[in-house]
Every structure is written in C-alpha cells, then in structure tokens.
Image (tube, helix red, strand yellow):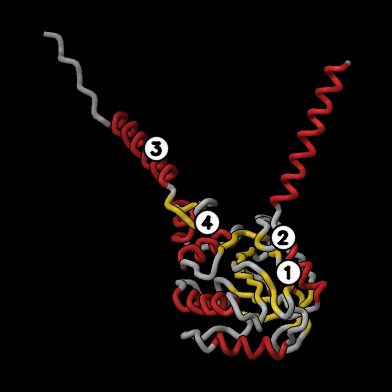
C-alpha cells in the first residue's frame, strides 16, 4: 500500500510540474502557434470605407492576414511596406490567386485612418490591383481579441503603444490558419508556397502541385526547403521500375537447336 501511495504521489507531482511548465512556456506576447485553427469568420469589422463587414464575406480565397496598428512607431510600417514588395514581385495575381487582409488591433483607430494608410501603401504597388483585394479593417476590442486569440497573435498595450510580434499569417479560404511567416521580411517563394498550401482542395496549376511536392516547410528554420528525401525516394522508385521494365522487355536468347 505504501508503494502504491508513493507511486501515486510521484505521478501527481510529475503531472503538476508538466502542466506548470506548459503554462510557463506559453507566451504572453508573440505568436502562439495554432496551425489548423479556425478563425471566427462571423466576426465583424469596419472596412476602410466605414462599412460593417463580416470576415466570411471577405475571406474568399487564400489570404495573407496581418495584425498591425496604424500609428505604430515600430515594425508595423516595415511589415506593410514588405507586403507591397511581395505584391510587386510575387508571380501570383492579387485578387485572383490570393488577397491580403490587414486588421488594426488598436480599438481606438477608425476607418478614416485605415483608408489613409491603405492609399499610402497601395501607392507603392506598381501594378493595378482590384479594389477589394487588400482590405484595411478596424473594430472594437471584442472583435479584435476574438480573431487575434484564435490566430495566436498575442499583444499587450503599453501606454499609447503596444508590445507585439512581427509576422504574417496565411489562412485558407475557409479561414483556417495554414502558415506563420515571422519577422518583417519574407521571401516571395515562402509566401507563394504558403499560399499554395492554403489553396488545398481547390484547383491549382500543375507547377504549383509540383512545387508543393518538391518543397516542404522546415519548422526549425521557419522556411521552405527542398525535400531531398522525398525526391530521392521518387527517383529510386522510377529507377527500379525502369529496371524491372527493362528486364521484362529484354528479348530472351533462344536455346541452340539440337544438332
């Protein structure tokens, strides 16, 4: 009985410490990785024109979602500027292949400021883009928290400013989190691959399917890498199949006729 009680206490202690460590490792500010999470698409925001819109009416294709606040003195402006560079250089057409949704997490910011920021950043895009392909949204604190919490974007107000991370989040047309790209600079190839993944279940060009097969996401490096193992395995299978086919089609020597 004493041994059983001792084992029970040890098990309880281990479970308690494991939960405590999990609680401690969860970030208070930054990105809480929630791949596959469903965003609350019924949540409503004001667009840059001042109209109240639900996310489900905006997110209709693979979407680059980013959280900023328009008066940010730090990394928000570089992120938005980087997105204009992505639009300019990505070999996908915004409005057709993907879209961008920018949400302010400062509940005091209003549509007038969102519209001014939108005009400012769209002036840096050197191609014509459909009017609804990049939305700048504002909303109340409840709507903001509903979406940022679901997406794993954690931030905190610090006086007139905020403490927050830099990242863009690629979501599927159904509003599921597909990929996080961290920092303030993003490789167009990484963005394209994330959008291709987000397009799962919808028709896509053969070249995109080939890219998805040849490259896979590396969680440690937080980038896409050539999948050597997968390609090597495919090449090996092709060589084996070719060798077997060669043996089957190779003409057999006829035995010499008896004298």
Contact check, label 1 and label 3, Cβ < 8 Å: no
Mark earlier in primary sequence (1, 2): 2
Q: Which residue is at the far top?
A: 259
Label 2: how many residues lie within 10 Å, few (<14), some (14-19) or many (20+)?
few
Mark earlier in primary sequence (1, 3): 1
The residue wearing badge 1 is 156
Q: Quick one: quadrant of the C terminus?
A: top left
Residue 92: x %, y % from top left: 49, 72
As measured in the structure, the alpha-carbon distance from the residue carrying label 1 to the one carrying label 2 is: 8 Å
Query: Mark 1 or mark 3, which is nearer to you?
Result: 1
Which residue is drawn at the image coordinates 46% and 68% (left, top)? Answer: 188
Horizontal relation, residue 219 to residue 248: left or right: right
The residue wearing badge 3 is 237
Q: Which residue is at the far front?
A: 159
Which residue is drawn at the image coordinates 79% and 33% (left, top)? Answer: 13
Residue 138: x %, y % from top left: 73, 80
Q: Looking at the image, which is closer to me, 237 or 77?
A: 77
As measured in the structure, the alpha-carbon distance from the residue carrying label 1 to the one carrying label 3 is: 53 Å
The residue wearing badge 4 is 222
Residue 71: x %, y % from top left: 66, 83
Horizontal relation, residue 73 to residue 252: left or right: right
Residue 42: x %, y % from top left: 79, 70
As measured in the structure, the alpha-carbon distance from the residue carrying label 4 to the one carrying label 3 is: 30 Å
Label 4 residue SS: loop
Up-down relation of residue 183 to residue 87 (above or below):
above
Q: Quick one: quadrant of the N terminus?
A: top right
Mark earlier in primary sequence (2, 4): 2
The residue wearing badge 2 is 28
Mark earlier in primary sequence (4, 1): 1
Label 1: how many residues lie within 10 Å, few (<14), some (14-19) or many (20+)?
few
């Amino acid at each position: 009985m004493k041994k059983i009680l001792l084992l029970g206490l040890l098990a309880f202690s281990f479970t308690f410490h494991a939960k405590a460590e999990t609680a401690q490792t969860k970030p208070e500010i930054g990105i809480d990785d929630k791949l596959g999470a469903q965003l609350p698409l019924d949540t409503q925001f004001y667009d840059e024109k001042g109209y109240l819109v639900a996310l489900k009416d905006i997110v209709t294709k693979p979407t680059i979602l980013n959280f900023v606040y328009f008066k940010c003195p730090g990394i928000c402006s570089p992120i938005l500027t980087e997105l204009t560079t992505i639009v300019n250089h990505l070999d996908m057409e915004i409005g057709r292949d993907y879209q961008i949704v920018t949400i302010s997490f400062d509940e005091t910011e209003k549509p007038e400021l969102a519209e001014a920021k939108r005009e400012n950043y769209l002036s840096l895009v050197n191609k014509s883009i459909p009017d609804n392909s990049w939305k700048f949204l504002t909303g109340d604190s409840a709507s903001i928290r509903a979406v940022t919490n679901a997406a794993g974007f954690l931030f905190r107000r610090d006086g007139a400013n905020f403490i927050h991370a830099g990242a863009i989040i690629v979501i599927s047309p159904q509003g599921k989190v597909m990929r996080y790209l961290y920092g303030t600079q993003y490789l167009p190839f990484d963005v394209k691959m994330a959008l291709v993944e987000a397009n799962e279940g919808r028709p896509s060009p053969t070249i995109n399917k080939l890219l998805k097969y040849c490259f896979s996401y590396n969680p440690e490096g937080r980038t896409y890498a050539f999948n050597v193992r997968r390609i090597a395995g495919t090449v090996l299978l092709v060589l084996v199949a070719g060798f077997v086919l060669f043996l089957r089609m190779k003409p057999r020597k006829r035995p010499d006729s008896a004298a």
